[in-house]
Image (cartoon, helix red, strand yellow):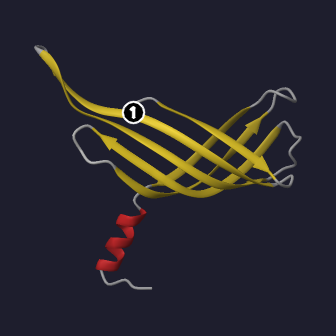
Amino acid sequence: GFMWGAQVARFFTPHVGVEALWTEQSSGLELGTSSGKATLFTSVTDQLQGSVVFQLTPTRGRLQPFVFAGLGSTFFHATDLASETKLSLGIGGGVKVFPTPTIGMRVAAAINSAVVATIMRRLCSSGVRR
């Protein structure tokens, strides 16, 4: 499905800042044959996350590499199923590219996990203790 979102960031020093990110992704499963189609389910996944960002170079360069780590909540909604909310962790990095001083773009890669509670339950039930 299609994914979209919004993000804001505020830097407190030339290298350290915080950001808030919201994304939404729609998905579903549809089966089809020559005689017709049937939608089995549709789902929407929303994520709200806050992160600490570390910019590796000064803020005025044309290329600004960065790394980030944060936590938040992931909200799962599906047709005919109860909604669920899970703790999510995210880590990643990327680069901001500024062809002009006021116009730029951001390219980033991230790993987000929304199964922290499930992993902790499995670790605790298998005998692993703190």
Quarter containing the C terminus = bottom left
Q: Name the one closer to the observer, 64 or 37.
A: 37
* Residue 115 in picture, x, y percent from top left: 39, 59
Can see residue 103?
yes
What residue is drawn where x is 52% and y is 52%?
111
Residue 33 visible in image? no
Q: Is residue 62 left or right of residue 77?
A: right
Residue 63 in percent (x, y) is at 80, 39
Classify residue 110 as left or right of residue 105. left
Please give the name of the residue rendered at 79% of the width and 53% of the height, measured from the top-left corner: 56
Q: How many marks?
A: 1
Q: Residue at x 37, y 67 (%)?
A: 119
Using the image, determine if residue 29 lies above or below residue 94. Answer: above
Q: Amino acid at mark 1?
A: Ser
Q: Nearer the viewer, residue 46 or 57?
A: 46
Q: Residue furthest left?
A: 35
Vertical comparison of 25 with 73: above or below: above
Residue drawn at the location 39% of the way across and 33% of the way down? 26
Residue 40: image x %, image y %?
19, 32
> Is 127 positioned to the left or the right of 107 in the image?
left
Q: Quadrant of the N terminus?
A: top left
Judged from the image, the secondary structure of the residue bearing numbered disc 1 is strand
38 left or right of 106?
left
Q: Whole-percent x and y of residue 49? A: 56, 51
Q: Mark 1 Cα within 10 Å, few/some/many (few <14, many 20+)?
A: some
| Residue ID for mark 1 | 26
